[in-house]
Image (tube, rainbow, N blue to C red):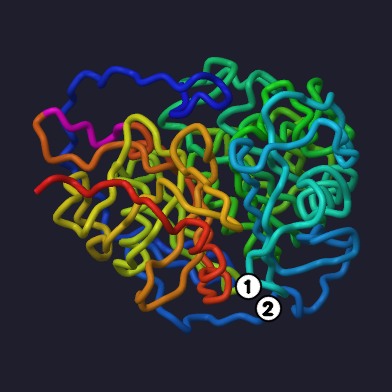
Amino acid sequence: MADEPQNRSLQQSPSPAPRSRSTALLPAALPLVALGAISLITGNPLVPGVNPAPSAATAPAVAGSPAPVPLLATNHPVDWWVAYKFNSSSFPGNDADPGRGCAFGGTVQHGSYSQKYAVASSINPVLTDGPGLIGSSPADPLGATFAQIYNGKYRFVTWNDQFYGDPARKAAHCDGQQCGSPWGHSKGILAWNDAGVGMVLQVTTPSWPGAGSASHPRKDGNTLGCVTDNNIENAQDFFALRLNRDDVKVVLHALAMASVSTDVANAQIVQSGADGTRPADDIDTLVVSLGRISKEKTYLDAQLSSGVRLIAKPSELHVPPWQFVSSVLGGEPLLTATWWAYPTITSTRNAADVHCWDASLPTPPGEVDVALAGTWNTVPVTFTGGPNHAKIGVSLPGSQHRYAIFGDLNQQGQLGGTASSRCDSSQNGRGGMFFVIDNAALANGIAPLLTGKIAPFPAG
């Protein structure tokens, strides 16, 4: 079962039976892969200034069909955008709102929901209230970006560990509804044109999107807020990023490493040259490797052409997720907000609080605070399991960098240190990806949302 029963009553499960942690250490580094000019570093922190690249928005055009790009609205492309959709407790929706609709099929869902959001982008990195309702029309970033993919003629991969039966995923550790550990706790869609140029849309929404093209529609609809499993009651986050061809290959490599749940034989969620619809190429070869549980034990740390950093955690690396991110970022102190529910990982002061660890990781983790409550426009916002299903983080004030981080994994698992510790517990034992932007305006805009009450530190 997945770690959080989305839109179902939160169950406080009993502690699992004790199991000893493996004492095997990870290899020191993953061999470099031939992925073009991308800076790919595994086993060591990324060195600032290595392979700097121009903004993707100013990169030369590639011959062939137009590539899908992040859009703030129709005909308004950007390098990247991020949106935080608020929960229904803080900003309840209105059933009579004329902006609600099902542009990609489905039936408008009623009851407890919210589609209010805040957005930032490469052209305006300050997080501000977004216009309209997110995911509802070509006038909002999610609606415009997804419409471009869904109504276009692109190659794509869609993944989600919580499809809830449409499409069904009948595989090991999947019950047809959702896929539990060690499948990656990861959701999103990657789309590219015949030249291999495209974009990635990372989401945190269970049961959306469940199809990548109108040519193979989802039975239950494919519009945010119009799917039977209410995916808009809790807070979610969305991150869209422009990619060149080498970037697409790096993202596919990260997807395989994170063991994302997809099905390369199902045209509803995967379409590429590998399915015989177009001549296959090296990107399609990477696509074929997806939909399997990876046994990889080393992480991926890559700088993409936009300067955005991509970190992938494999399921076999049994460490607390955001302490792992802190380590890969050189021990960066972080403030995080995720679905914080049983089994919870507390805030940690430093490496002394973290016993589920691995000597192959580059540096000890710095302080990692778990946000439990904050505010937006003076309205209280809660980040515990239930209200918040987003997975975001920023550097703590006074840190060397001003990182903003958008991830797949929750602070759920164990820190270890007791005889009954299971270091593969919950999200310690699952894969996922983290997109990292070193941008002061973005981080400073997100930080007030997360600033308030934090989870306690371990005793002692």
Tell me if mark 1 has few (under 14), some (14-19) or many (20+) residues whose alpha carbon lies within 10 angstroms of its own.
Answer: many
Mark sitting earlier along the chain (2/1): 2
Q: Nearer the viewer, residue 348 or 115?
A: 115
Assess whether residue 99 is covered by the magenta stretch: no
Q: Nearer the viewer, residue 437 or 444?
A: 444
Region of the chain picked out in magenta, as a range: 420-425
Q: Which residue is mark 1?
A: 306
Residue type highlighted by circle 2: Ser
Residue type highlighted by circle 1: Ser
Work out whether residue 56 can be spotted.
Answer: yes
Q: Splitting the image into 4 quarters, where does residue 161 fall?
A: top right
Q: Splitting the image into 4 quarters, where does residue 14 fall?
A: top left
The percent position of residue 454, horizontal first and vertical second, equals 34, 51
- What secondary structure is the stretch in magenta mostly built from? loop
Cβ–Cβ under 8 Å for marks 2 and 1: yes
In the rendered image, the vertical position of residue 335 relative to residue 161, given as above or below? below
Q: Nearer the viewer, residue 286 or 376?
A: 376
- Which residue is at a point 80% across and 38% down the rendered structure image? 276
The percent position of residue 312, horizontal first and vertical second, equals 46, 53
- Which residue is at a point 69% across and 67% down the rendered structure image? 121
Work out whether residue 279 can be spotted.
Answer: no
In the rendered image, the vertical position of residue 303 relative to residue 7, given as above or below? below
In the rendered image, the vertical position of residue 355 relative to residue 434, given as above or below? above
Spatial separation of the CA atoms under disc 2 and disc 1: 5 Å
Assess whether residue 423 is covered by the magenta stretch: yes
The percent position of residue 445, horizontal first and vertical second, equals 56, 68
The percent position of residue 306, horizontal first and vertical second, equals 63, 72
Q: Which residue is mark 2?
A: 55
Q: Secondary structure at mark 2?
A: loop
